[in-house]
Image: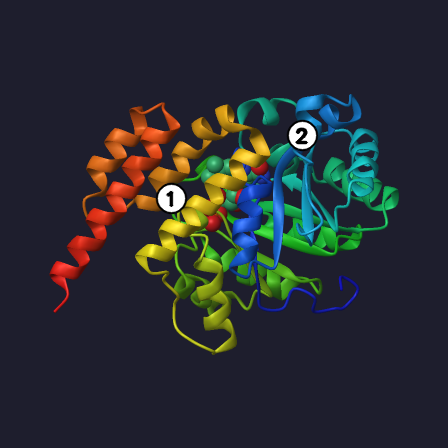
Amino acid sequence: MFKEINWLKDKALLAPLAGISNLPFRMIARSFGCSLAFTEMISANGLIRKSERTLDYLKTSAEDIPLGVQIFGAEPEVMAQAARIVEGCGAALIDINMGCPVRKVIKAGAGADLMRDPVRAADIIRAVKKAVSVEVTVKIRSGWSLNSINAIDFARIAEDCGAAAIIIHARTYDQGFSGKADWSVIAGVKKAVGIPVIGNGDICSPRDALKMREETSCDAVMVGRGTLGDPWIFKGIQQLFSGAGEEYLPTLSQRHEIINAHWKMETEFSGQKIADKSFRKHLLWYTKGLPGSSRFRQVASIMTDRQAMMDELDRFFQSVDQLATEILP
Ligand SMILES: Cc1cc2nc3c(=O)[nH]c(=O)nc-3n(C[C@H](O)[C@H](O)[C@H](O)COP(=O)(O)O)c2cc1C
């Protein structure tokens, strides 16, 4: 599949999301038509040290395909070794993180720091590319700062070093996650390179995805925060991209079922104790914006007992359902 020139055309991808894009979340996203899902960024150093916690991020399943595994690091040889480990674990594609703004990562010369060091970045891409036979992509930002936007030069370097595609989060390092993503940078990169370009930043709805595709001519879109509590965004994007329909919204009972299915998967994956803690954030995202959700969210955020939390969720959905029937003619 990845050998075709346009393997990414009109696809919607799940972004690497630290603490979020684990196997259960990827499977939920895939169930709504996400075409390619990424693990969170994984430390190349941790991988080659065989740290158990790091190797946990590679947990996958036969249905979790195609899988993109993202690695980060600053040393070409370490990145190459890590890439070999990742390839052996079933990754269809390896992405190199050149956009992470976390201080510890930057201090180590990895993530977005590489945008200030194109020579080292090129060495890393070449080393990883040489080490594996799966495709290698690079996820970059627009540049280090608004005064030093270099995504176009960077994308050209990545292409020359053998990258199969460029993913661009259209913000600079010093913007972090605030301010607006400048999609014109994605359009510029698309014009400058021959490999597929995946646009990322501020897609909060299927309409945003369509708008990004129209404004930038990007081959595919990648969605991060827009999937939180809204994994069905992929179905809406697919429908809009194919011209087959409008935005998709699950009914209340479908939403309730999705939450329960996700929670169950999370429990099987992490064990009940960890799942109950980590799933709380998903409960808050899934219920955001629903009528009467603020009370539920307040209660859910302090509850520790699983059964009580599930009962509260059932009660909440009953009350929303009742409210909806009262409001509707
Ligand atoms: C909680 C969180 C974790 C993230 N983790 C990663 C990561 O591991 N690797 C990465 O390249 N980007 C990571 N990102 C950045 C996203 O992949 C994406 O580039 C960014 O959020 C912009 O896209 P969005 O506006 O669709 O969210 C993370 C973002 C968030 C909010």
User: Disc 1 to disc 2, how far (Cα)?
Assistant: 33 Å
Q: State the residue position of label 2.
A: 56
Of the pair 32 and 121, the residue shown nearer to us: 32
Quadrant containing the N terminus in the rendered view:
bottom right
Indicate the position of residue 260 as horizontal and vertical percent values: 43, 44
Q: Is residue 119 left or right of residue 303?
A: right
Q: Is residue 197 left or right of residue 283?
A: right
Q: Secondary structure at mark 2?
A: helix
Residue 100 vertical position relative to residue 288 in the rendered view, above or below: above
Residue 171 vertical position relative to residue 312 in the rendered view, above or below: below
Q: Is residue 139 left or right of residue 120?
A: left
Disc on res. 179: 1
Query: How would you rate the neighbour count of disc 1 (Cα within 10 Å): few for under 14, some for 14-19, many for 20 or more?
Result: few
Indicate the position of residue 99 as horizontal and vertical percent values: 58, 39
Disc on res. 29: none
Among the two numbered marks 1 and 2 on one chain, the one whose residue lies closer to the N terminus:
2
Indicate the position of residue 284 as horizontal and vertical percent values: 34, 38
Please state which amino acid type lies under the numbered disc 2.
Asp
Please state which amino acid type lies under the numbered disc 1.
Gly
Q: Quadrant of residue 221?
A: bottom right
Any part of residue 258 in sight: yes
